Image: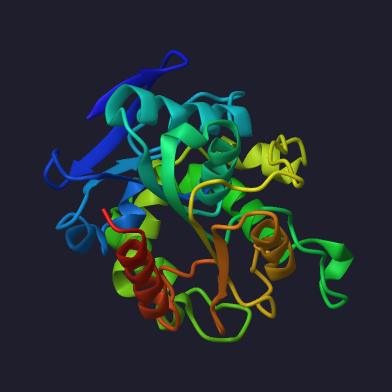
């Protein structure tokens, strides 16, 4: 499915019976709709599952210079207004999570409930061991910004890229193949082959607009799932998440021990994420 927003054509994958309650899934900064492939069959038994490729990602139009929080929020709202037409459940990872949070603050009428996976509600302070005080993900983003154009120009298949990624060492000494689910690596490879590397520029140069109001809570029932704060790539500070829970009566926080930022794709944490999602959906009902 395709929709038009802000002069751009956006791709939207749809699964499940259209008469079922709607559930919108939003991906992270270098990802795409395919990152949710592993859980869609299960969710589609109960929901009309819609997965958006944000501008510059996946099969959606590229728009250099327009990769801003405002733009991503606009994309999500466009799906809600043009396609869904009723309050929906939203599941968002990282960029997708904070985008859902902003939409809840601005347009709570569009969202019935939300699951926010390690969203940047406020980047946690760097630990003393992090060189230069930089967040652990920034070095990875710099490398990706440099390597993605060449990777795309090489004409490699997603399977070949996934094989390359599997051998990449992580900070712990294990390889990505040891720590990331195989289908997670494949979707990561597909996303890297389809993303405009310029989406990373506002993050790397510090110009990404911060639209979340720290003093305003979330009205819809919300589950914030955070990575383990001991992990160098953890984004959602559990203390900041608990702050939002303290001013949002229907918001709860779950921190997944041992999980890094890619909670839903890591071998140690995917099952915990799946269980948390399904249990929350059971509680909010359809």
The quarter of the displayed image where residue 166 is located: bottom left
Q: Residue 123: x percent and y percent?
A: 74, 57
Q: Where 194 falls versus 130 (above or below)?
A: above
Q: Residue at x 54, y 58 (%)?
A: 250
Image quarter in which the N terminus is found? top left
Q: Residue 33: x percent and y percent?
A: 34, 47
Q: Which residue sits furthest front?
A: 249
Q: Residue at x 38, y 38 (%)?
A: 53
The quarter of the displayed image where residue 226 is located: bottom right
In the image: residue 243, left or right of residue 167:
right
In the image: residue 275, left or right of residue 237:
left
Q: Residue 168: x percent and y percent?
A: 50, 73
Whether residue 55 appears in this view of the structure is: no
Q: Residue at x 48, y 54 (%)?
A: 221
In the image: residue 243, left or right of residue 75:
right
User: Coloring scheme of the render?
Assistant: rainbow
Whether residue 79 appears in this view of the structure is: yes
Q: Where 254 falls versus 68 (above or below)?
A: below
Q: Where 164 falls versus 144 (above or below)?
A: below
The answer to which of 259 and 164 lies nearer the viewer is 259
The answer to which of 251 and 155 lies nearer the viewer is 251
Q: Residue at x 33, y 62 (%)?
A: 281
Q: Residue 117: x percent and y percent?
A: 51, 61
């Amino acid at each position: 499915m395709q929709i038009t927003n802000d002069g751009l054509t956006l791709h939207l994958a749809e699964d499940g019976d259209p008469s079922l309650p709607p559930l919108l899934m939003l991906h992270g900064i270098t990802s795409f709709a395919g990152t949710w492939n592993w859980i869609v069959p299960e969710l589609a038994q109960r929901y009309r599952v819609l997965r958006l490729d944000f501008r510059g990602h996946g099969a959606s139009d590229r728009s250099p210079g327009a990769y801003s929080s405002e733009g991503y929020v606009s994309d999500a709202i466009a799906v809600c207004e043009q396609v869904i037409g009723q309050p929906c459940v939203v599941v968002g990872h990282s960029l997708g999570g904070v985008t859902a949070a902003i939409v809840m603050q601005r347009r709570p009428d569009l969202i019935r409930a939300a699951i926010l996976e390690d969203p940047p509600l406020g980047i946690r302070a760097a630990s003393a061991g992090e060189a230069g005080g930089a967040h652990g993900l920034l070095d990875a983003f710099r490398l990706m910004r440099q390597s993605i154009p060449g990777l795309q120009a090489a004409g490699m298949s997603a399977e070949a890229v996934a094989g390359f990624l599997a051998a990449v060492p992580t900070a712990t000494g294990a390889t990505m193949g040891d720590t990331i689910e195989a289908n997670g690596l494949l979707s990561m490879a597909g996303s890297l082959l389809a993303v405009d590397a310029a989406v990373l520029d506002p993050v790397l140069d510090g110009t990404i607009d911060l639209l979340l109001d720290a003093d305003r809570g979330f009205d819809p029932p919300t589950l914030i799932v955070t990575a383990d704060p001991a992990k160098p790539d953890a984004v959602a500070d559990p203390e900041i998440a608990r702050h939002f829970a303290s001013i949002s009566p229907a918001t709860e926080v779950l921190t997944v021990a041992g999980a890094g930022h890619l909670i839903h794709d890591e071998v140690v944490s995917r099952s915990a994420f799946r269980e948390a999602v399904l249990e929350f959906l059971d509680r909010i009902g359809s």
